Amino acid sequence: MMLESNTTERQLIEQFLDTLRALPEVQAELDHRGVPAGLAGDKGHDAQIDLHIAGKSFTILIEAKKAVYPRDVREVLWQFREISHNRPKAQSGDEAVSVLVAESISPGAKELLRDEHVGYYDSGGSLFLPAPGVYLYIDKPPPKTLSKSVRSLFSGRRAQVLHTLLMRPQEWFGGKELAEQALVSPATASQVLTELERFDWLVSRGQGPSKERHLREPAALLDAWAKQLASTRPPALRRYYVPSMKADTLLEHIGQVFAAHEAGYAVSYEAAAQRYAPFLSSVSQVRARLLVSTAADAAIGALGARVVSEGANFSIIEAKSPGELLFRQQVDGIWLASPIQVYLDLLRGEGRAKEMAEHLRKERIGF
């Protein structure tokens, strides 16, 4: 995707120049002879910079884009190979170095570019410049535009689409079928699939209405979700104490009382993980998602639970829609959140929760 605005392109290249000039022993000047004043790209690249660093001279050939994801990297590499092939050898005695300049470059795309020894710079200030005898690498947080886009992918109803794909990583989905299973609109499912294709995590087959997708990289998607959670606030917990109940007994009691009141719930965190893949000798509390309803309020009352600020043995995350209980599983009469949801919840837990998460992923999730 080329930058839509030449002004934006110029601003980004100027920002790249300023970053280079701020480094020690560096001189960098835009070579206006490199690209004709007419259409950018007449010579196969969008701009050219003369770079002098630590006594060495280089010609930086720039390709400008708006946003770059892993699936875009193949095209970028092809463009740079064409530039290198078509550039006259006598044009300059300096070594030519290809650099991709973009408003945003996803972490996966950066990794691919580094693997191919192709330079890059984004508007967040991240810089990678590999050249003979010179190696510059500055890693900064992604630009806000990319962070916001990624954050929205792993939240709300979009997250339900990811949840569906991760629970059924071997299946092929049509857009309509995926939307139905994820309890979202076809438009939401389509938007998520488009985003995932940019990250090169999907494989597709067929065309038009019959087009189907398959999650090729479930581990990469789950890793990305886990990483995103580390930068977001954990869900709010309502803490209770249910008297005269040990955790194991309490779990059974919750299952019976909630079933009697037809309250929608899904136990998560340590109590659920212990049922899926035993790891701890004992669990001190039960945490569950509970679908907000009058039935839920009645069930909590029937438990004899009282609100506490510390010493809780039962905690609740309020669920606003059935989509938050997707893929719950009934084990020995208790509704447990899906292994994927339990894993993600444990990553935000305390104590040995993260160890338990990795054990669950290895034993139950498998990728």
Image (cartoon, rainbow, N blue to C red):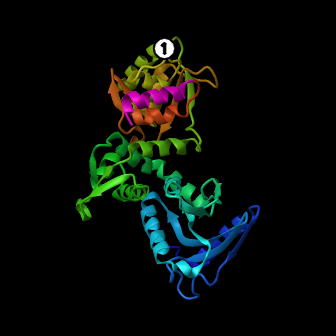
Q: Which residues are magenta?
A: 352-367
Q: Amino acid at mark 1?
A: Ser
Q: Residue at x 57, y 81 (%)?
A: 91
Q: Is residue 116 above or below residue 288?
A: below
Q: Quadrant of residue 34?
A: bottom right
Q: Is residue 177 above or below residue 18?
A: above
The verdict on residue 158 being magenta is: no
Q: Check disc 1 and report its element: helix, strand or loop.
A: loop
Q: Residue at x 55, y 38 (%)?
A: 235
Side of 158 relative to 348 (left or right): left
Q: Residues within 10 Å of mark 1 (few under 14, many from 20)?
A: few
The residue labelled by disc 1 is 281
* Residue sitting farthest toward the top: 244
The answer to whether residue 38 shows anywhere in this view is: yes
Where is residue 265 drawn, in percent x and y?
41, 31
Q: The C terminus lies in which quarter of the figure?
A: top left
Query: Which is nearer the eye, 268 or 196?
Result: 196
Q: Is residue 356 magenta?
A: yes
Classify residue 219 by image quadrant.
top left
Rendered location of residue 49, percent (x, y): 64, 74
Q: Which residue lies at the image location 40% right of the left edge and 22% below the top edge? A: 275
**Nearer the observer, 340 or 301:** 340
> Where does the image place residue 6, in percent across and percent down from the top left?
58, 79
Looking at this view, is 178 or 132 the one in front?
132
Asked if residue 290 shows in the view, the reply is no
x then y, percent, for residue 361: 42, 32
